[in-house]
Image: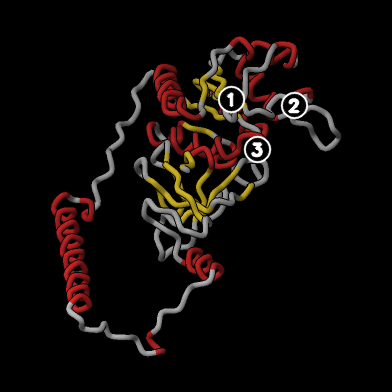
Amino acid sequence: MKKAFISYRRQDTEGYAHSLHDRLRINFNSQQIFMDVDDIKPGDDFVEILKNNLKDCAVLIVLIGDRWVDIKNSRGERRLDNPDDFVRIEVATALGRGIPVIPVLVKGASMPTKDELPENLKDLSQRQAILLTGASYDHGIEQLVSSIERYFGSQRRSVVPPSTPWYKNLFFKTIWVLLVVFIALVFLGAIIEEYEKVTNGTPAPTLRPAEQPTAQTASEKIRKAEAYPPTSILTDDSKTFQLAKVIDPPSNIRAKPNGKVICQATSSSIVTVKRTAKIASNSGKWYETNFCGKDKLLGYIHESQIRLRK
């Protein structure tokens, strides 16, 4: 079985690697997309597993972030200069065996030059790269999937579009609109009736002290907003949350950064996220979101999956 091998550095592109891994498994057999974290079990010989999977590798995908060339070890030595570095072994083995290598640039990275690479990686600088960032993200994914199809010699799996939830059905939308209109008319009638009483000289009823509304303090508003995050297209007054658009559905919402998937955003949804992101190691920013529903804990979505909206 032909495989696509994803090579990456945890300190540089771990979040992007997980996202790309999940995305490619949608279009291809899950056993055809190899990534060390998900596919190497505790106790396995790491180097031996990598080399065995490279035997069946039809294409190697190298994720390159803005720190890929210069990341150093605990002794301050550049990792690429170490012959035993796993990433160097993966890429050098693929280049040496004539396996197609596709550089994928993220986080604003540019292709490394020959002078920046060790001798057995210099050919990498001549490979055509794919850019995954901002407006070009969807185009880059399509380029990558099409390239994998060509190297596999088989077509991608067709993705069945998610069914429309019942509450988004046209009939129920019409019911909701009519209900909102009815409630608005009731409130309007009450306001008109009260206005007529006042203009006709009938004093408006006064509230007893116990019924007088109390003003909410700023801290109370913030606590209330944190307990019940906004889910509409409006953000809360406390500025605790903001809106974001899912740019590459389906996108996983995880229980913690790089953790278990608890639900998916299966369309270009608008999600509500906390303005303050959580940094997970060196894998980038993860944003808390209530997208999975009030009955579940807040989940996390990676910065590569969303575009923040002002």
Q: Residues within 10 Å of mark 2 (few under 14, many from 20)?
A: few
Is 77 situated left or right of 232 in this image?
Answer: right
Q: Is residue 299 above or below residue 154?
A: below
Where residue 131 sits in the image (x, y, percent)? 52, 22
Secondary structure, mark 2, is: loop
| Location of mark 3 (residue) | 10
Residue located 79% across and 27% down the image: 78
Q: CA separation, marks 3 and 1?
A: 12 Å
Say which of marks 2 and 3 sits in front.
2
The first of marks 2 and 1 along the sequence is 1
Name the residue tied to disc 2. Answer: 70
Q: Nearer the viewer, residue 23 or 304?
A: 304
The disc placed on residue 62 is 1
Q: Residue at x 48, y 50 (%)?
A: 242
Q: Give the image location of residue 108, x and y in percent.
A: 60, 26
State the CA–CA distance, disc 2 to disc 1. Answer: 15 Å
The mark found on residue 51 in the picture is: none
Tell me which amino acid carries mark 2.
Asp
Q: What percent of the width, then of the height, locates residue 212?
A: 40, 83
